[in-house]
Image (tube, rainbow, N blue to C red):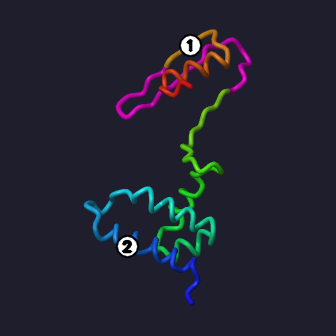
């Protein structure tokens, strides 16, 4: 009798191979359902074993495993540094976009006001 986990690993590998054969562009991103299944298998069987079994790059699989938090939601990595103000100098906010970089000098804001302003500028207001 074949263990049930082998069938699952084989199933994901077959879906991945079928997608690779039928995709329209060689650099097309892999569909999210296949990544989700691969991440689930990696959590069950380990990164290395899963990557070998389904023929995936282990580094890419690791990135996807790390991008999922405990609640199962995808977490977008972000970096925000809010240093404690040592002096009354203005805040400089730098917004980097695909076509331009904008720098704003904002004097006299507290950390809470700065957080609200950056959320509104980024369109992520709660």
Coordinates of residue 69 in the picture (x, y in percent)? 62, 49
Q: Which region of the structure is painted magenta?
A: 83-103
Residue found at x 45% / y 62%: 34
User: Is 24 rendered above or below residue 76?
Assistant: below
Q: Quadrant of residue 26?
A: bottom left
User: Is 123 rendered above or below residue 113?
Assistant: below
> SS class of the residue under badge 1?
strand
Q: Is residue 84 left or right of residue 65?
A: right
Q: Quadrant of the N terminus?
A: bottom right
Q: Quadrant of residue 126?
A: top right
Query: Crowding near pointer 2: few (<14 within 10 Å), some, many (20+)?
Result: few
Coordinates of residue 78 in the picture (x, y in percent)? 57, 39
Name the mark on residue 106. 1
Front position in the image: 42 or 91:
42
Circle 2 is placed at which residue position? 17
> SS class of the residue under badge 2?
helix
Residue found at x 40% / y 58%: 31
Front position in the image: 104 or 15:
15
Query: Crowding near pointer 1: few (<14 within 10 Å), some, many (20+)?
Result: few
Residue found at x 51% / y 75%: 9
Coordinates of residue 46 in the picture (x, y in percent)? 63, 70
């Amino acid at each position: 009798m074949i263990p049930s986990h082998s069938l699952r690993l084989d199933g994901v590998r077959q879906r991945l191979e079928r997608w690779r054969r039928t995709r329209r562009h060689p650099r097309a991103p892999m569909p999210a359902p296949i990544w989700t299944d691969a991440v689930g298998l990696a959590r069950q069987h380990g990164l290395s074993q899963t990557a070998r079994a389904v023929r995936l790059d282990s580094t890419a699989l690791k990135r996807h495993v790390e991008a999922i938090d405990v609640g199962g939601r995808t977490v977008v990595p972000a970096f925000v540094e809010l240093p404690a103000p040592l002096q009354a100098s203005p805040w400089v906010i730098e917004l980097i976009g695909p076509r331009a970089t904008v720098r704003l000098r904002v004097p006299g804001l507290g950390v809470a006001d700065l957080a609200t302003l950056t959320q509104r500028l980024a369109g992520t207001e709660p």
